[in-house]
Amino acid sequence: MVRTMKDGVRAHPDFSELLRKNGLERFDDFMGRKIACAGRPVGDGGSSVLALDGSDGPRDLVFHRSDRLGLRQVLDDLSRLRLPSAPVVRQARVAEVCRECGIEAVAVVAQGCRRRLGLGWQGFLLTERVPFGLSVPQVLRAWQTDMPPTARQAHRFCYELGQFVGRLHHSHLAFGRPNLGRIHASPRRFPNGRDLWRFCLADFEGMVLTSSRRRHRSDLRRLLRAGRALCPARRDLLRFALGYVAARRDPRVQPRKALAHSFAWAKRTWRVFAARSAPAKLDDFIRIGRVVVHAAYMPLLQENGIGSFRNVFQYEGGVRLDKPGLGQRERIRVQLPGSDGQPVTLYLKRYRQPGLRDQWRRILTCRADHSTAWWEWQQVRRLRRAGIPTPTPVAFGEKMGGWREKCSFIVLASAPGESLERWVPRNLMDGQTVVSVEDRRRLVRQVALLARALHQARFCHRDLYLSHVFVDMTEFSTPKLTLIDLQRVFRPRWRKQRWRVKDLASLHFSCPRRAVSATDRLRFVLAYLAADRLTPTGKRLIRQIETKAARIARHSAGKAAATVAHPNANG
């Protein structure tokens, strides 16, 4: 219900007395210079917060004002085949549609419009502030830092957020400038134990009345981009889409068909979204110039003078881990004092002016427009998204000259435990009683499951030796494995089986005969294939592994002989 005040100003009955008490009755009272300059700005479009004196204390209201209808706005409205009017006039209409359709939004306290030649030339809109909850980004950010939600809460949140957006579009409304910050959310618990969410539209800036499907699709695209850091999982997108479709679909249409009809256009967008998002929030990484650094490690790096691109290449500390064949690559183990007094071990790889051969190999096998360090950084993040345990990425930076890599670096946290290359001979050799039979079999199975998960995610390591698998045996019942040295990881498009066999043959070759028995190797193959007994497929795989391992052995023997004959050839 709306009450008309003086000079065409319309106000909510519950706020009429508050406005009169503060001398706001006429149109000029709201549009006066004194009122317009009294508030604190809260957003675009001339919005500000007004503190009015009420009977129960000061009350904060949000004031939106349009001084005049500009030529640009007139041309924009005419190009969209609609009658030109001030932005606040459309905002008032949007608020009225929300009230008529039962969509929860901030209450309109007062509104007014002055017309010229039948056009809404100037006007104002006074609304309440959001009475509850936090904005959607604030809720999700709180989940990531302070109070992680239950699975049910997260599921219902995504579904009901989709329902809220679907109801807006079903009511012929479009955001215009989609922003998840304008939607506020608050949990509510019902007596039957159900956890539902309450959503509210915080402001109407930029919103328009339209039934154009193109505008609604544009809203969804921008909302997906805005929520990339907040909804990283594909299942969250699916729940959002199901809620959106449930709010709009015809009851006679099956949900699967309605979903395919409403979001068929978004297949590529979702594919890119799923490829770029990560389980960890993107706010964890901060870009400073040429350097991308993990927020948790940024103070540590800056305190030790390696927080910038130039300082990383000028750093002379740490322990060099160089070996023959590295070329222009430098490997350094760095120990820095942590905030709790415990040393933090990091591994730094630096690439200085790679040679022509390395440049050509990078262009053919990695990316032409990015460096070698960038490629390893991306593989680490992709593997972590796929659930493959890898060292924590700390920082990386690159300097390119077109397709030529000038220099780059990557910093990774140390993996817990030690490499299987050192652990296996010391604990699994004949006569050793450190590890029981059950723990031995459990470790073999864990390594097989790691290789299986890597290949099921369509990745191949290309250097899957025992030296590149770290094991943490703090608890023998649950050995924790970590995959390192991910520079050559890639997703093959052709001859996938060939690369998978190479990975398995590398493991087979690097396992000492005296430490890993034939029975252990058979158990590895069965666990890798998820089979109870050896089938013709398993036998064929074993033959392929042995053949490839024999080739690796011959190649390694020839390389070792060449190194002995020419000790300085690779130095």
Image (tube, helix red, strand yellow):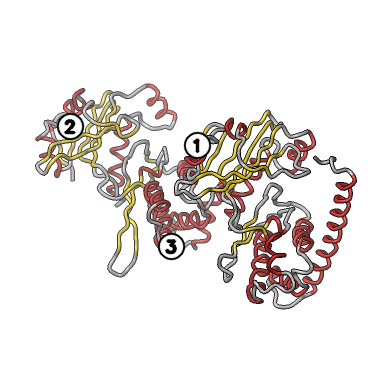
Residue where numbered disc 2 is placed = 8
Q: Is mark 1 on a helix, strand or loop?
A: helix
Residue drawn at 65 percent across, 53 percent down: 484
Is the Cβ of the residue at disc 1 closer than 8 Å to that at disc 3? no
Left or right: where 313 falls relative to 467: left
Q: Quadrant of residue 483?
A: bottom right
Q: Nearer the viewer, residue 273 or 311?
A: 311
- Label 3 is placed on what type of residue? Ala
Residue at the spot of label 1? 302
Residue 61 percent coordinates (x, y): 22, 38
Q: Can residue 156 be seen in this view?
A: yes
The amino acid type of the residue labelled 2 equals: Gly
Q: Where is residue 277 in the image (x, y as percent from the top left)?
A: 54, 48
The answer to which quarter of the image holds residue 70 is top left
Q: How crowded is mark 1: few (under 14 residues within 10 Å), some or many (20 or more)?
A: few
| Label of residue 151 in the image | 3
Q: Note whether residue 265 is visible.
A: no
